[in-house]
Image (cartoon, coloured by chain):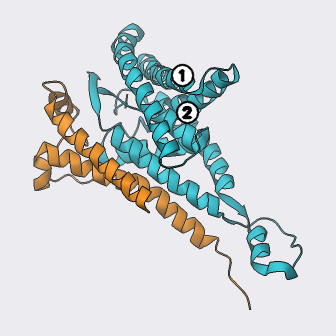
Amino acid sequence: MHLPDGFLGPKSSAAFMAAALAALGFAFRKVLSHVSEPAFVRALAAAGDKVKSITGKGLRTLSSSGSEYIGKLAMVSSIIFAFQMFNIPVTGGISGHFIGAVFAAIVLGPWGGLCAMAVVLSVQSFFFSDGGISALGANIFNMGIIAAVGGYFLLKGLTVIRFPYYIALFITAVVSVIAAAAACATEIALSGTYGLYDSLASMIPVHVRIGLWEGTLTVILSLIVRKIMGWTVK
Amino acid sequence: MKKIFGFVIVVIVIIAGAALFSSDLPDGLDSFIGNRGLHRFSGIHVSPFIDYQIPIFKDRNWGTFISGLIGTFLCAGFFLFFRFLFARLTKLHKQD
C-alpha cells in the first residue's frame, strides 16, 4: 500500500502533497480546538468564588480532557505502527498490510485519526524508508483521507440506516482497505507507471483478503479498547 | 498506570510477532525487501539518513524488532512531545 519514490510523477506527487497538507492543516486546527480551552476558563476556576466573570479571548490552554486525548493519539499511532509491520508483498515494490485507519477514526474521530495516520506514515517514510518521501502526500491521501476520514463518514452513514454497529464497523474497515488500494492503483495508473487494469488487478484481490483481516482486527481492537481501556468508540 | 503498562507489553508482543513472522515468509518478502533497498526491515539500514550498518541489524529478527520499537517510540513520542510543548507554552502563571 505504501507507494515508494518514483512511482508517481512530480506533478502528481506535488498535487497529492498539497491536498494532504491542506487536509492536515484543517485536521490539526480541529484537534487543537478539541484539546484546548479558553485560558479564562482555567483562570476562573483557579480564582475561586471571588471572581464571577472574566472577559477576554485569544489564549487557549491545554484542557485535562485534551491531555488525555493526546495520550490516546500517542497510543493509537504506536499500535497502528506495530500492526503495519506485518507486510505482504504485492508487486514491484508495493506492499499490503493492516491499515488501522478506521480503528484510529472511531477512537479519535476523523480528524484525530487523520493526524495519527499522518504521523505513522511520516515516521515510516522519513526514518524507515517505508513509502517514499516524494509519495508521502499520496500515501496520506490514501490511508489517511480516504481510509480514515472516508471510513468514519461511511460508518456514520451505515449506523444512520440502522446497521448493527459491529457489522457496520466490519464492512467499513473492509471497504476502507479496498478503497485505499483502488486509489493507490489509480494514482499509479495516472502517473503512467503501470496500466489501470494491471494496477487494479494486482492490488484489489490481495487487498480484499487483507480487508477481511482488517475488518476482523478492527472489531476485536474496538472491543478491547472499549472493555479493557474504557475508551468510547464513535 | 496498569493499563498503560499492559498496553506497552501488548505493543512489544505485536512487534515481536511481526519480527518472527516476517522472517518466516518463504520467498516474497526477503527478495522484495532486497529489491526495495532502503527498507525498514532490511536489516541493513536504519534510516535513509543514517547509511551505516549496525551489527545487531544484520540479524533480520533483531533488526525488525528494534526497528519496530524505535518506530512505535517515535510515533508515541511525537504526540507526547507535542503535549508537553503545548502545555508548557500555554501554561498560566499565577500572580500574587
Query: Which colour is chain A painted?
Result: cyan
Q: Which chain carries label 2?
A: A
Asked if A225 appears above or below A153 in the picture, the reply is below
For residue A89, which quarter of the picture? top left
Looking at this view, is A50 or A223 the one in front? A223
**Which mark lies nearer to you, 1 or 2?**
1
**Image quadrant assignment for residue A81:** top left
* Residue that numbered label 2 is attached to: A145
- Which secondary structure lies at badge 2? helix
* Amino acid type at mark 2: Ile
Q: Mark 1 lies on which chain?
A: A
Q: How many marks?
A: 2
Gap between marks 1 and 2, in whole Å? 22 Å
Residue in front for this viewpoint, A158 or A207: A158
- Packing grade of label 2 (10 A; few <14, some 14-19, many >=20) is many
Give me the residue at 70% from left, 23% from top.
A160
Q: Name the residue under label 1.
A: A167
Query: Does residue A121 appear anywhere in the picture?
Result: yes
Q: Where residue B73 sits in the image (x, y, percent)?
A: 36, 56
Q: Label 1 sits on what residue type?
A: Ile
* Residue depicted at 67% across the width and 60% down the height: A36
Looking at the image, the residue that sits furthest to the front is A227
Cβ atoms at labels 1 and 2 below 8 Å apart: no
- Percent position (x, y) of residue A50? 87, 82
**Which chain did the image draw in orange?**
B
Q: Earlier in the sequence, mark 1 or mark 2?
A: 2
Question: Considering the image in quadrants, where does the C terminus of chain B appear?
Answer: bottom right
Q: Which quarter of the figure is the N terminus of chain B placed in?
A: bottom left
A36 over B45 or under it: above or below: below
Q: What residue is at 14 percent from the left and 32 percent from the top?
A: B24
